[in-house]
Amino acid sequence: MDESFRNWRIVAVRRLSEEQLRALSAIGHVDYFEDLTDDNRGDFHAAMQQADALIGGKLELDENLLAEASRLQVVSTISVGYDHLPMAALNRRGILVCHTPDVLTETTADTAFALVMATQRRVVELANLVREGRWTAHLGREHFGVDVHGKTLGIVGAGRIGAAIARRGALGFNMPILYTAGSPKPALERELGAQRRDLATLLAEADVVCLSVPYQADTHHLIDAEALSHMKASASLINVARGKVVDEAALIAALRRGQIRAAGLDVFEEEPLPAISPLAAMDNVVTTPHMGSATHETREAMAQLAVDNLIGALTGDGPLTAVNRDVWQRVPLLREAH
Ligand code: NAP
């Protein structure tokens, strides 16, 4: 038998290909849940009690489930964000967490730019005129949008995705770039002439503001009523980060009173967005269903990276992209199992 086969118990949740499941089966026993429903949740909990490793998308791992999963050593999420995981408890338990950065960066930046174009040029609203048979005369001023090219693009969180959005703006649309981040980005400044600003100044100067920060304690409601009050009345807000980075009630109020012009939102405080949310019906808001990375190619690459991370963690090569790599160094259990 292969040395790396230790009959690991692996729980896999949501959207792995047959080939990926076969690769996991080569190192252990896999309990696969294509989706979690009321019917199979009991089986999922039973499997988690035996599990050494958990892999999947939209993982519903809270502290209660973690307490049940006494053997768990590795969590491999099919996402770059890990705000849905109880990181403090996972770190306390010395459980390795892996995520999928980089492979989704360009696709998520494409989504952000689709929202930039749609909000600035009112694409959805005007396309609906045609679809609904209301295109009965030449467009008048009341239907005009605003330009994208040449406008100032403000990136809140110039990390991997933020930088990719900035490149699209600067190189494709000749947009001056402003950014915020935890640390200066000299390479981005050299490459694109981007300039770092504090948040209030960026919000006051940008025509299009794109949010690409992680959701964490210091970014909860980063864009609240006060932040929105700094923005130009002609500006658009684009959010491909996480819903709770924005105070949605404050955003709705700002859009209603014309304090900002428009918003393009891929993420929401509650998902799926409740049908009764005013955001779903406002003409100056473009809403998409958390589709940032949702292309065939990128979802496949994310799942593959998550599988490679899990196999790397369990077979001794080490994970490729870990959130808490120090656990790999700190906890001998995984490394010395081989
Ligand atoms: P990343 O490379 O870690 O970039 C995050 C950036 O935010 C970094 O530049 C970081 O600064 C900066 N930052 C952190 N806290 C900040 C704060 N309080 N104020 C200003 N900037 C701050 O992550 P990424 O790969 O670009 O992903 C970003 C987020 O996008 C993910 O966490 C996820 O939630 C979201 N996302 C959404 C979708 C979707 O489907 N809509 C898809 C993918 C990702 P430093 O560089 O100094 O650390």
Image (spheres, rainbow, N blue to C red):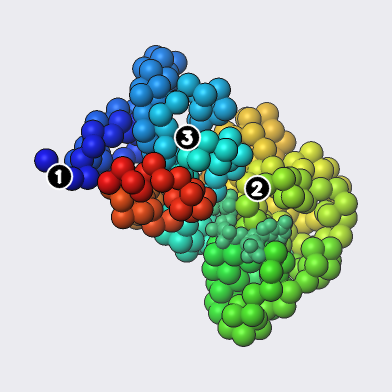
Type of amino acid under label 3: Leu
- Whether pointer 1 and pointer 2 mark residues with C-beta atoms closer than 8 Å, the reply is no
Q: Residue 215, which numbered label?
A: 2
Quadrant of the image occupied by residue 149: bottom right
The residue at label 2 has a CB less than 8 Å from ligand 1 = yes
Lower sequence index among marks 2 and 3: 3
Give how far across and how far down residue 273 sits, in percent: 61, 34
The residue carrying pointer 2 sits among few (fewer than 14), some (14 to 19) or many (20 or more) residues within 10 Å by Cα, namely some
Give how far across and how far down residue 138 sits, in percent: 64, 61
Q: Which secondary structure lies at badge 3?
A: loop
The residue carrying pointer 1 sits among few (fewer than 14), some (14 to 19) or many (20 or more) residues within 10 Å by Cα, namely few
Q: Residue 39, which numbered label?
A: none
Image quadrant for the N terminus? top left
Mark 3 vs mark 1, CA separation in Å: 30 Å
Residue beneath disc 1: 2
Give how far across and how far down residue 182 sits, in percent: 70, 64
Type of amino acid under label 1: Asp
Residue plotted at (51% across, 57% down): 108
Q: On the rendering, which quadrant does ligand 1 occupy?
A: bottom right
Residue beneath disc 3: 59
Q: Which secondary structure lies at badge 2?
A: loop
Using residue 122 as the reference point, say whether residue 19 is left or right of it.
Answer: left
- Whether pointer 2 and pointer 3 mark residues with C-beta atoms closer than 8 Å, the reply is no
Mark 1 vs mark 2, CA separation in Å: 41 Å
Q: Is residue 149 visible?
A: no
Residue plotted at (42% across, 59% down): 103
Type of amino acid under label 2: Tyr
